[in-house]
């Protein structure tokens, strides 16, 4: 009887977990600046990619120390990364051609 009550309590606690950052930020828009970067080279692109990853982790949450069954964070990261990719690729492709003011050199993407 005690074992079944303990199992029920654990199951109830799992259901009542707080809303993850991924769910709380769904639909939000993220901005990542590249105003200070030279995207014509690999070094600048790598820094830009790290900034995008940090922004994604900030809005979706981080998997470090999380149980492997926390799929909401993983799904948010995957979907948001996919949403950011076209903007990232366009920024890199048009870097030398764009006549944007430095303050306008940023990408925006939605949290999925």
Image (spheres, rainbow, N blue to C red):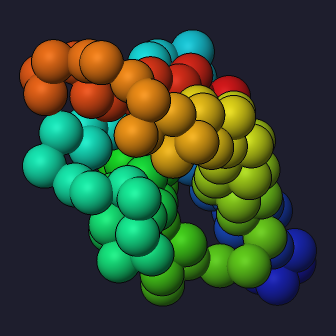
Res 50 visible: no
Quadrant where the N terminus is found in the figure? bottom right
Residue drawn where x is 13% and y is 27% of the image = 102
Query: In terms of depth relative to the viewer, which is nearer, 101 or 80?
Result: 101
Residue drawn where x is 32% and y is 38% of the image = 32
- Name above or below for residue 35 compared with residue 108: below
- Name above or below for residue 69 compared with residue 104: below
Residue drawn where x is 27% and y is 57% of the image = 38
Q: Is residue 22 left or right of residue 15?
A: left
Query: How many marks on residues?
Result: 0
Res 110 visible: yes
Q: Position of residue 96 (x, y in %)?
A: 40, 40
Quadrant where the C terminus is found in the figure? top right
| Residue 8, quarter of picture | bottom right
- Name above or below for residue 55 compared with residue 95: below
Residue drawn where x is 65% and y is 79% of the image = 67
| Residue 23, quarter of picture | top right
Query: In terms of depth relative to the viewer, which is nearer, 11 or 91?
Result: 91
Q: Position of residue 75 (x, y in %)?
A: 76, 50
Q: Position of residue 19 (x, y in %)?
A: 53, 37
Query: In terms of depth relative to the viewer, which is nearer, 49 or 41?
Result: 41
Q: Position of residue 61 (x, y in %)?
A: 46, 55
Q: Is residue 30 left or right of residue 23?
A: left
């Amino acid at each position: 009887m005690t074992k079944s009550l303990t199992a029920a309590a654990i199951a109830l606690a799992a259901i009542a977990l707080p809303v993850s950052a991924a769910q709380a930020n769904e639909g939000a828009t993220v901005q990542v600046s590249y105003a200070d970067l030279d995207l014509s080279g690999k070094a600048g692109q790598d820094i830009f990619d790290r900034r995008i990853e940090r922004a994604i982790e900030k809005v979706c949450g981080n998997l470090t120390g999380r149980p492997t069954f926390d799929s909401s964070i993983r799904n948010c990261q995957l979907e948001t990364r996919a949403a950011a990719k076209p903007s990232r690729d366009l920024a890199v492709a048009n870097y030398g051609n764009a006549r944007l003011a430095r303050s306008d050199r940023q990408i925006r993407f939605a949290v999925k």
